[in-house]
Image (cartoon, rainbow, N blue to C red):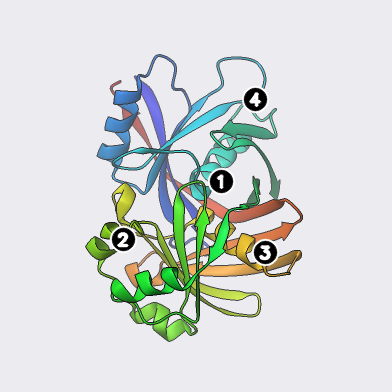
């Protein structure tokens, strides 16, 4: 038997956040069993930690339907477990995109992620958004995270809140990871739809926040900060703090622990 910590990551105070399962010991656990646990949990992601060897712990991230190379809220949640529960002696972990440093600033857990470089602003991205039933965006981009994300600026918080995309249409156009947002300076309102990985709408999406930081960096804002509010439309109010400088994007948020489950595997 092994344990699975059930957390809420990127909470707004004690409320909301994105549920996450963290299995802190994946010793002897085959990939098939990891996928079964993630599917049974039903959260946007479940993360598995391997720290059997001395040195940097490694993590693997699963959605209810597939393994993915990178996601923000699992890394923040894994950092919280590594720092708060144990071993407490490491300050980085590795995932499929490389090593991820992390630290605590009061209650806020921060992870440093690499800045995305593959960014394309094209009319096609906007046309895809419209074809999926979204309002015509002010701007739209493709960003590889490394999965391809459609990122669309809808121009107003009201447009973001009322959007009802056709998820099947997004899938048909290879836009099954879709981030919509509006911004007012450092304040951002956002939603994320991920039918490509079995998540109709995600309450809080660190990787998409990093994609938006990469876009702003690409457009000339070499250093910056923003606060992203997400999840209100589905009853999971969440807040993501974002900073960027050079090749690094920092993702920060608060974490709450809900329960510890005992797994049979």
- Position of the C terminus, as image quadrant, is top left
Q: Secondary structure at mark 2?
A: loop
Helix, strand or loop for disc 3: helix
Q: Mark 2 sits on what residue?
A: 173
Mark sitting on residue 218: 3
Q: CA distance from mark 4 to mark 3?
A: 31 Å
**Marks 4,1: beta carbons within 8 A:** no
| Quarter location, residue 130 | bottom left
Q: Nearer the viewer, mark 4 or mark 2?
A: 2
Q: Point out the frontmost of discs 4 and 3.
A: 3
Q: How many residues crowd around disc 1 within 10 Å: few (fewer than 14), some, or many (20 or more)?
A: many
Chain-order first, disc 4 or disc 2? 4
Q: Nearer the viewer, residue 179 or 259?
A: 179
Q: CA distance from mark 3 to mark 2?
A: 25 Å
Residue that numbered label 4 is attached to: 56
Which callout, 2 or 1, points to the residue nearer the camera?
2
Location of residue 103 in the rendering, given as x and y in whole percent from the top left corner: 70, 43
User: Which of pointers 3 and 2 lies earlier in the amino acid sequence?
Assistant: 2
Density class for disc 4 (Cα within 10 Å; few <14, some 14-19, many ≥20) is some
Label 3 packing within 10 angstroms: few (<14), some (14-19), many (20+):
some
Q: Which residue is the extreme one toward the left?
A: 168
Question: Which numbered disc flags the more N-terminal residue, 3 or 1?
Answer: 1
Residue position marked by numbered label 1 in the rendering = 76
> Marks 4 and 2: CB-CB under 8 Å?
no
Q: Position of residue 182 (x, y in %)?
A: 51, 78
Q: Secondary structure at mark 1?
A: helix
Q: Residue at x 26, y 58 (%)?
A: 172
Q: Quadrant of residue 264?
A: top left
Inspect this view and state whether residue 238 appears. yes
Residue 154 position, x and y percent, is 46, 80
Asked whether the residues under the numbered discs 4 and 3 touch, taking CB atoms below 8 Å apart as contact, a structural biologist would say: no
Residue 221 percent coordinates (x, y): 73, 69
């Amino acid at each position: 038997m092994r344990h699975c910590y059930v957390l809420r990551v990127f909470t707004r105070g004690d409320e909301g956040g994105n549920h996450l399962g963290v299995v802190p010991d994946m010793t002897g656990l085959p990939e098939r069993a990891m996928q079964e646990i993630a599917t049974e949990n039903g959260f946007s992601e479940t993360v598995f930690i391997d720290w059997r060897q001395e040195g940097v712990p490694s993590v693997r991230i699963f959605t209810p339907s597939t393994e993915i190379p990178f996601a923000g809220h699992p890394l923040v949640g894994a950092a919280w477990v590594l720092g708060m529960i144990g071993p407490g002696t490491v300050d980085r972990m590795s995932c499929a995109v490389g090593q991820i440093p992390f630290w605590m600033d009061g209650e806020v857990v921060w992870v440093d992620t690499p800045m995305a470089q593959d960014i394309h602003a094209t009319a096609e991205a906007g046309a895809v958004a419209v074809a999926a039933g979204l309002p015509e965006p002010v701007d739209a981009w493709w960003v590889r995270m490394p999965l391809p994300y459609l990122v669309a600026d809808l121009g107003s918080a009201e447009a973001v809140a009322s959007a009802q995309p056709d998820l099947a249409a997004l899938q048909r156009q290879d836009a099954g990871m879709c981030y919509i947002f509006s911004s007012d300076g450092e304040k951002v309102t956002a939603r994320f739809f991920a039918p490509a990985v079995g998540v109709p709408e995600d309450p809080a999406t660190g990787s998409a926040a990093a994609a938006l930081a990469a876009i702003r960096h690409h457009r000339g804002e070499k250093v910056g900060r923003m606060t992203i509010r997400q999840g209100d439309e589905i009853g999971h109010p969440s807040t993501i703090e974002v900073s960027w400088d050079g090749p690094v994007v920092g993702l920060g948020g608060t974490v709450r622990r809900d329960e510890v489950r005992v797994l049979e595997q």
